[in-house]
Amino acid sequence: MAKLELVYFAWVRERIGRARESIETQAATPLQLIEELSARDERYGAALSDVSALRVAIDQELADFDTKLTGAREVAFFPPMTGG
Amino acid sequence: MAKLELVYFAWVRERIGRARESIETQAATPLQLIEELSARDERYGAALSDVSALRVAIDQELADFDTKLTGAREVAFFPPMTGG
Amino acid sequence: MRICVQSEPFNIAKELQGFGAGRGDIGAVVSFSGLVRDDSGHLQMLEVEHYPGMTEKSLSSCAQEAVTRWELADVLVIHRFGRLQVGAPIMMVATAARHRNAAFEAAEFLMDYLKSRAPFWKREITAQGTQWVAAKDSDEAALARW
Amino acid sequence: MRICVQSEPFNIAKELQGFGAGRGDIGAVVSFSGLVRDDSGHLQMLEVEHYPGMTEKSLSSCAQEAVTRWELADVLVIHRFGRLQVGAPIMMVATAARHRNAAFEAAEFLMDYLKSRAPFWKREITAQGTQWVAAKDSDEAALARW
């Protein structure tokens, strides 16, 4: 089991109902992490099930949903950015 | 015979040796005007013979060397612009 | 190079003061500023959320990439977060280069990257409620040209 | 719209002060400034000659064309003539529009037209003498895209 800090932004944060949390997980990728979270509570499913509408960052770098989480400390889920 | 104000800029002005002059001419186009001037004095030939290196404006609007001079009051010869 | 992520308002002209000035190797300075626009006539505020830490990192690496690709003499990026009023500047970039094409291209590159790669999210606040601004496919597509 | 043809030096930041500010219909402001560059290390001054009367007319019609094509909310053009020091601004354009692409494109259009269509001629003054700056084919070619 690895310890991970999860952070959420914008409507992902609103749907999950919190901005951050620490979890223990065996997930090897963000996609597995989403499956694991969605099994725990339906709020995660509502926020994270459609990955085409999501972005993920691992340790503050944009990543793919099948990037390995090995060694990761912080994973962030959020909608496509709208800066500028 | 029409009366025309001629103005010159940059190295055209330097080669002709003056910035402006009033002339009487029968030239129907800037090209004919150049031929007429060149016949008068070799300085005009030195300044104006290579029209590919020149631009012409009629009454302060860029024009072609075969544009009709009918009604024109001011004709300017100068090198390609280098503003900006 | 100067990267600012701030909640404080800023003045475009003031930030540009002295940028690229007094040197012999800069021929072109370009600036772009994005302002809070109110298309509906009902916008009260724009709220910008961001990801502290990642924001600074992504803006810096984007600016660094621009400096390398276009040999910029200087680059400036400012982006606000928090609540912004209609008409207020949200962000700005400025580039200084030897030639104008480099300065223009680098500024457009910075904007395109920042739009789709820097972790900011906008929310419109009106009397009727709040709404997250949706990302545009055209913004993502704009990255393809670089 | 503001068009200035002047021998006096100007300050880019100061001229931009308030440009496009305090409105709800402007989302993007772009500025471009051209500065006197010294590539050889021997430039003492840059001298800019112009065609009084035609200069103002050509800058105005160029700005008017940009406003029409890109629905600009505002446009600013300043161009100096006379003797300019190394590092000093020669000219600037600024555009304000609803969207960023319009503001960027209009600014580049103004620059491309101004370079090849406005009656300015530059001459470099060095200790060795003076030399007229030659027009670049690439500047003329740049007009083709509009």
Image (cartoon, coloured by chain):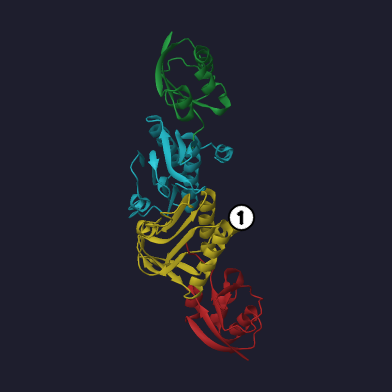
Chain colours: A red, B green, C yellow, D cyan
Residue B34, above or below C128: above
Q: Position of residue C30 (x, y in %)?
A: 46, 52
Report which residue position mark 1 lands on: C145
Residue C89, above or below D93: below
- How many C-alpha atoms fall within 10 Å of the one at disc 1: few (<14), some, or many (≥20)? few
* Circle 1: element type: helix
Q: Position of residue C20 (x, y in %)?
A: 43, 56
The quadrant holding residue D27 is bottom left
Instruction: Name the residue rendered at 40%, 46% in the picture.
Output: D85
Residue B30 in view in this figure: no
Residue C54 in view in this figure: yes
Tell me the chain of label 1. Answer: C
Instruction: Name the residue rendered at 57%, 24% in the picture.
Output: B50
Residue toward you, B66 or B34: B34
Using residue A20 as the reference point, say whether residue B3 is left or right of it.
left
Residue located farthest toward the front when viewing the structure as drawn: D128
Residue toward you, C80 or A47: C80
Amino acid tagged 1: Arg
Q: Position of residue D86 (x, y in %)?
A: 43, 48
Using residue A50 as the reference point, say whether residue D91 is left or right of it.
left
Residue A42, above or below C64: below
Query: From the image, which quarter does the C terminus of chain C lie in?
Result: bottom right
Residue toward you, D51 or D117: D51
Residue toward you, B81 or A77: B81
Instruction: Name the residue rendered at 50%, 45% in the picture.
Output: D108
Residue located farthest toward the bottom when viewing the structure as drawn: A1
Residue D132, above or below A81: above
Q: Position of residue B1 (x, y in %)?
A: 43, 8
